[in-house]
Amino acid sequence: MTLFSHILLFLKKMSFSIISLFFYICKSHFWLPYIYKTQKSTIFCPKKFIIMETLREEAPSSYLMKLVGFSEVKFSHQPYESAAFDAAGYKWRLIFYPAGKVEEGGKDHVSIYARIDNVGASEMQIDVELKFFIYNHKARKYSVFQDGNMKHYSKEKKEWGLARMLLLSKFNDPKNGYIDGNACIIGVEIFVVKPIETVERVAFTQNPPENKFTWKISHFSKIGDKRYYYSDEFVVGDRKWRMKISPKGDKKVRALSVYVQAMAYLPNAVASSTYALLKLRLINQKNSNHIEKRVFHFYSRETQDGSGISELISVEDLNDESKGYLVEDSIILETTLLCVSETMFVDSI
């Protein structure tokens, strides 16, 4: 190996080691303030979670307050507690540390928390999603801060928030837009997550019972003037179905069009989308040269939602009795639902 090759290998190993060390430090020890930044968002990398800042035009839905003459307290480690406000069925207070909550690692940062005032006697835990807001006067939008973690409020833990929401140097720099005219606007959006009561379970069943329907159409020549002609209904899975044909086609090309429509749901069935994989077949009554096509479709909750083949066979070939599809003025169609979804509600996953 040449000297040049040795140098390249060494640099490659060193680069990998430096990158590995960088991510290890970020994950396990310290906060690195700017790992990823765009015009719309900034992601901070803390010890256990990521704080993301995004912009939006809408004000917070839970609470908003404006601090005027902010320079008096902007270096204070003592918190300002807002008046009590109602959100999501509880009373809260917004707790703002202009110079950080040092005891929770908020040194050199702005810290913000939401405290619950009335945890019920029977409530062991209240799960909450929090979003904190600072109005950005430069962007004329609200900066939204969140870490994506569920907050578990209880009698023992009534206060949650972000100790390192934003670097003080960035917050206090007028060019960043967080403070304008010696005033800042902060807020919070609180969403209480209720325990899920039911789960929708969708099962895709292959070859469900009685999944084949045969439709023999006698006196076929006498229905030629009808645009559509319908079969009787049949049941597969948790809803009814029927076939529909257009003897002379739905398009400019003269061809037999064949569709399968999803109809009403059975009693007590869950009205949701229904997936079906269909096999449509025009039977050759003289030999085994059947015409067969497959179609898959997510049928909506609307009845008569249909899917199929617009050109299964040309009118000329169909009417040519020597080909075996029209015999004694009758044709035979089959549809087989190879796979069908059925939906139900269950208590848990």
Image: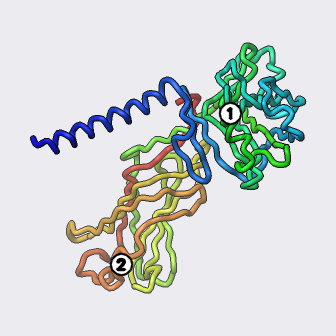
Where is residue 18 drawn, in percent x and y?
A: 37, 34
Position of 127 with respect to 70 (left or right) is left
Point out the tag, 1 or 2, that comes first from the N-terminus.
Answer: 1
- Residue 11 vertical placement versus 288 (above, below): above
Q: Residue at x 52, y 57 (%)?
A: 299
Amino acid at dot 2: Asp
The residue at which mark 1 appears reads as: 129
Q: Which quadrant would residue 209 be assigned to in this image?
A: top left
Image quarter hosting the N terminus? top left
The residue at which mark 2 appears reads as: 329
Q: Residue at x 44, y 49 (%)?
A: 340
Residue projecting furthest to the left: 1
Amino acid at dot 1: Glu
Q: Which quadrant would residue 124 be assigned to in this image?
A: top right
Q: Secondary structure at mark 1?
A: strand
Where is residue 298 drawn, in percent x and y?
A: 49, 56
